[in-house]
Structure formats: C-alpha cells, structure tokens
Amino acid sequence: MNNFDFINEELELLEKNNLKREIKTVKTANGPWVELTCGKRVLQFGSNNFLGLSSHPDVINSIKSAASKFGAGSTGSRLLSGSSELHSELEKVIAKFESSEDSICFSSGYSTNIGILSSLIGKEDVVYSDEYNHASIIDGIRFSGAKKFIYKHLDVNHLESLILENSTKFRRSFIVTDTVFSMDGDIAPLAEIGEIAQKYDCITIVDEAHATGVFSSDGSGLVSDLGLNNFYPIKIGTFSKAFGLEGGFCSGPKNVIEFLRNKARSFMFSTSPSPAIVGGVLKSLELLKDGSWRREKLWQNAKQLHTGLKKIYKLPVNNFKTPIITLTFKNIDDVMIFSNRLLNECHIWAPAIRPPTVKEPRIRFTPISTHSEDDIDYVIRAVDFLSKDLKVEPAFLST
Ligand SMILES: Cc1ncc(COP(=O)(O)O)c(C=O)c1O
C-alpha cells in the first residue's frame, strides 16, 4: 500500500479504455523513412516535418557552426544571459517574413501560446475560442483568467451570437483561432472572422503553426496567402512543423512585442532557445522562403494521397484543404487495430489520434515533400487492402 495507488488506478483505466499512450523511439533522422528501435524500417506519415527540412544538411551544418561559435546552451533567459546575436537576428528576419514591425521568439510553440495569451488577455476580458483550438491555446486562455466562450468549430454565426450576447459585459474582447487545425486539417474562415472582429471591436490572435511554410508563395502562412494581414496584426507560429526544428514566435506591432518581452512569463522565466537551434532555424527559414518547389511537392503528395484514399469505397476521408489528411473511425478499438496493422504489417507509421486530443478517433496522415510518388501510392494500396480485410465499417464523421 502506498500513496500512489490512485496513479495505478488511473493507468489501469487508461489501459482498459485503450487510451494509454506508448512512445515509439526512432534511431535515425526523421525523413520519409525512419528506423524504429525495434529494427523496423517504416514509412513516416505522422510527422510535422512538412518540407523535410529537419534533416537537411545545410540546416544541420548551421546548427553545428552556431554551436561552435556560441556554445551548446543559451545559459539563461533572454532577459539575463541567454540572448545571442543569432536570437536578435532571428527576431528581425521573422518580423520581415511576417510583414510585421517586430517579433519575439520562444522555446516552443506551446510556451508561445501560454506566454502571449496569458499576458495580453486579463481577468476582466472575454475570449471567444474555436472548439477545436490547440491545447496550448486552451491552456493559455486558462492562464489568462479571462471569461471564455467556445464557439462551434468554424461556425461564424455562433461566434457572432456569442459576441452580441456577451461582449458589452467585459473590458476587452479577443477572438483566438488556429488558422489550420492540426488534427482535422481544415482551415478557419479567416475573412469572416476578421470582419466580425472589426465590426465588434475584438482583438484577433491567430496561430499559424501548421500554415507557416505550407501556405503562400514564400511560405509566410495562410493569413498572408489570403491577403488578410490587416485583420490579423498578431500572429503566432512555430519552428517545430515546416521549419523542421523547435521553438515558437509571435509577430506583431512594435509596442505589442515590447510589452510581451516585459510581461510574457514563459519568455521571461525560461531559458531561451539554444543558439544552435536558432542557427538552424535561420537556415531553415532561408530554405523555406526560397524553396517554393518544396511546397509544390508537398501539396502534390498531399493531393495524390487524398485523391487515392477518397477513391476507396466508404472511406471517411476529410475534405482536402491542407496536407493533414484524416480517416475517422467509430471507436477507439477500430482505430488502434488499423494503426497497429498499418505499422506491423505494412511498415507505415501513421498514428492513431484518440480522445482527449480529438473527439472522434482517427488516423492522421501527414505526407511530406520528400515522400516519393511510390511512397504515397504504397500507402493508398495498404489502406485499401486493410480497410477491406478488416471489414471495419468506418464512420462518416469528417466527410
Ligand atoms: C496549432 C498549434 N499550436 C501550437 C502547437 C505547439 O507547438 P510546439 O509543438 O512547437 O510546442 C501545436 C503543436 O502541434 C499546434 O498544432
């Protein structure tokens, strides 16, 4: 008998409901193929390495030379010893890339959302948040202490009705949304949300984590691709998806960024990103901006996969909006069987996404620009074979 019996009970419950997470470990660089520690070589369809930059030799060389020059670790927070020339350079180039006055960088996308939302928004304010916003947005809003209203996913009518009902009772109103939804692969109605924000004097904050590098001719994201920068002065992004590294950023007006440097607690009270990573991000940004052929190949691969899966009888594939392609299932057991068979029999690593990450269980496929046409074709044939063989009657949840 010990004080941790409750932990065992919780773990047993997760196990019983097929919700216990298991970490799979890789022993090679992340690319279209990876080798797992069990020795299996598998096609990687579950990463966010959209442009394949995570293992690009130029990025790796930049990491090495930044580490040689500035050391391995940053040694402190940005406000103490942890601000190298590379950090300042990165904030300048990101501001330019985002067509903003200034930018601020964080150690992760998660800590970016925590820092931005909890400092810009206060207890006296109200936040309207899309039902499917990322966990880091949800947590950032919680930390702000503001009153939160959740509008139905992508539903601008619901958003407007909540604003009409509530906004006058609060000091300031904020609308916060992902631009690309990471687990659904759909996109926010940004023009409509922007108009509503203007009409009712709401401040918008958007998270472009899965849009940066993927949308617009220079990769600067969905907001700029749609020509909506005027509606969205404050944008959040990450270096952990298309950049292939780690870290996050917020771009915006000079005074907002200066405020964040003084108030965002996850910036002030956390060791800054290592100079090596920042060196890699700077190189990755160059490749990402200038390599529109990588984006074209990414979209081509995504389209090939989506079209192929759509042709399979009764398969519940999401609508094609982004390179995040999902198959939804009625229950957790089915999705686990499907994902495990993809891995064990077909050597395809496409993770099952379960509650609480999403409401409806699904397989999430993320093709990347370095997959070949044959890789994609193989996945389509494997899914076709398994869906027939398993006789899983999939739910039509996301179509
Ligand atoms: C929309 C969104 N915001 C923020 C994050 C967190 O980013 P990071 O993994 O860099 O902490 C993610 C991660 O998947 C995300 O999808």
Image: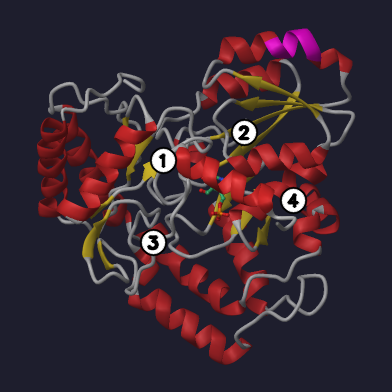
- The answer, for residue 112, to whether it is visible in the render is no
Q: Which mark is residue 230?
A: 2
Residue 152 position in % (x across, y down): 57, 18
Q: Nearer the viewer, mark 3 or mark 4?
A: 3
Q: Nearer the viewer, mark 1 or mark 4?
A: 1
Q: Which residues are magenta?
A: 162-166
Q: Which mark is residue 353?
A: 1
Q: Tag 4 or tag 3, which sits nearer the N-term? A: 3
Q: Which mark is residue 24?
A: 3
Three-letter residue code for mark 3 = Lys
Q: Tag 1 or tag 3, which sits nearer the N-term? A: 3
Residue 164 position in % (x across, y down): 74, 8
Q: Is residue 40 left or right of residue 130?
A: left
Q: Tag 3 or tag 2, which sits nearer the N-term? A: 3
Q: CA distance from mark 3 to mark 1?
A: 14 Å
Q: Circle 4 sits on which residue?
A: 115
Q: CA distance from mark 4 to mark 2?
A: 23 Å
